[in-house]
């Protein structure tokens, strides 16, 4: 984007005092708008959405500090960088300008070359921020469209800033990970991984935390796997994208059934054998007897072409890893 595409809003109750600056901006290819009061500045900013605002600090009525605060309080104008123009150079005035939301200040009498140089820096920064925001929105739209369970979490306090509908469903299903703040254990895990990225630039583990849902009676348990992704840009360093994937026992049982041509009950027995359960425990889970489990296991050995329980479990785990 060139200067010819940028719109500058100058706010000053005596615009004639800025004639030289206006001419310099116009000559540089900027589109220049002027507001003569704070109220008019807010209206123009909302209507025109300028790329930058040059704001006089001292004006009758609503002064520049209040204008800046109101611009930053409105989500529609908050991203617009504000550069104060002021004859006040005392420390408290500079602090007030920055506290009100200004990104910089220039002192009067204005030097057009200096103003243009400062504007260039802040316009470039704002442009990058818009691009990052657009990329983030596009990424979120894609995650929504393809049904991914994803959320953005602020590292500092663990607050969930954004999530897809599927993510909300999973977070509610696995109550220990509820909204709007993730549990302390998840926060600590994220903070450690984020610190490691900042320190060494390494990518965090793509699968690092498992939340286990209690097993339903007579069924297999489910697990929610959290994949942590690093921030895409420095400006998002305080936020991390987490993609969730549910790994359910029922899905694993179906995979084993189809892979080894087992009956549904045989697949359930093999699943729990692979989880390290003994026949008595499996019988309790499935509501049958240890003798029945033993008979199922004998048929499983035949279908898998193995002779031992350990070999059957190894075959099942190997197939589950391939299918995960």
Image (tube, rainbow, N blue to C red):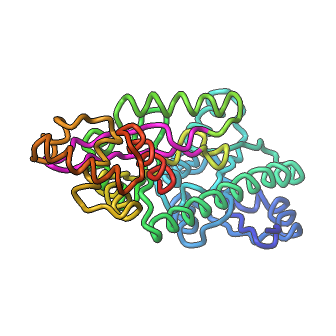
Q: Quadrant of residue 261?
A: bottom left
Q: Would residue 302 appear left or right of 25 to someone viewing this image?
A: left
* Residue 143 drawn above or below residue 154: below
Q: Position of residue 248 (x, y in %)?
A: 32, 52
Q: Residue at x 69, y 69 (%)?
A: 33
Return the residue nearer the eye: 290 or 247: 290
Q: Position of residue 318 (x, y in %)?
A: 48, 47
Q: Would residue 253 appear left or right of 217 to someone viewing this image?
A: right
Q: Position of residue 124 (x, y in %)?
A: 76, 55
- Which residues are drawn in magenta? 204-229
* Residue 5 drawn above or below residue 9: below
Q: Residue at x 64, y 49 (%)?
A: 232
Q: Residue at x 65, y 40 (%)?
A: 203
Q: Would residue 39 appear left or right of 98 to someone viewing this image?
A: left
Q: Position of residue 19 (x, y in %)?
A: 81, 62
User: What quarter of the picture does the N terminus occupy?
Assistant: bottom right
Return the residue nearer the eye: 138 or 84: 138
Query: What is the tally of numbered marks visible in this picture?
Result: 0
126 within the magenta span: no
Return the residue nearer the eye: 102 or 197: 197
* Residue 144 drawn above or below residue 117: below
Q: Residue at x 21, y 56 (%)?
A: 265
Return the residue nearer the eye: 107 or 147: 147
227 within the magenta span: yes
């Amino acid at each position: 984007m060139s200067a010819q595409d940028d719109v500058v809003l100058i706010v000053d109750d005596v615009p004639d005092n800025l004639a030289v600056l206006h001419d310099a901006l116009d000559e540089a290819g900027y589109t220049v708008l002027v507001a003569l009061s704070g109220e008019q500045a807010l209206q123009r900013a909302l209507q025109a959405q300028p790329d930058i605002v040059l704001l006089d600090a001292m004006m009758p009525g609503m002064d520049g500090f209040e204008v800046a605060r109101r611009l930053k309080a409105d989500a529609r104008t908050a991203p617009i960088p504000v550069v104060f123009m002021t004859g006040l150079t005392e420390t408290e005035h500079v602090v007030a300008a920055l506290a009100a939301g200004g990104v910089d200040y220039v002192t009067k009498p204005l030097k057009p070359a200096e103003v243009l140089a400062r504007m260039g820096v802040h316009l470039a920064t704002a442009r990058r921020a818009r691009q990052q925001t657009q990329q983030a929105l596009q990424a979120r739209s894609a995650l929504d469209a393809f049904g991914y369970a994803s959320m953005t979490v602020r590292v500092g306090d663990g607050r969930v800033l954004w999530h897809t509908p599927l993510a909300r469903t999973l977070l509610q299903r696995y109550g220990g990970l509820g909204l709007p703040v993730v549990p302390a254990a998840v926060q600590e895990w994220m903070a450690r991984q984020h610190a490691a990225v900042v320190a060494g630039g390494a990518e965090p583990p793509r699968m690092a935390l498992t939340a286990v849902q209690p097993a339903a009676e007579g069924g297999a348990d489910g697990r929610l796997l959290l994949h942590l992704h690093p921030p895409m840009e420095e400006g998002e360093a305080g936020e991390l994208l987490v993609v969730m994937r549910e790994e359910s026992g029922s899905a694993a049982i179906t995979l084993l059934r189809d892979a080894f041509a087992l009956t549904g009950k045989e697949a359930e027995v093999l699943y729990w054998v692979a989880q390290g359960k003994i026949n008595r425990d499996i019988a309790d889970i499935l509501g049958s007897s240890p003798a029945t489990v033993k008979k199922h296991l004998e048929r499983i050995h035949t279908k898998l072409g193995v002779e031992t329980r350990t070999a059957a479990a190894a075959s099942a785990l190997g197939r589950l890893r391939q299918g995960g």
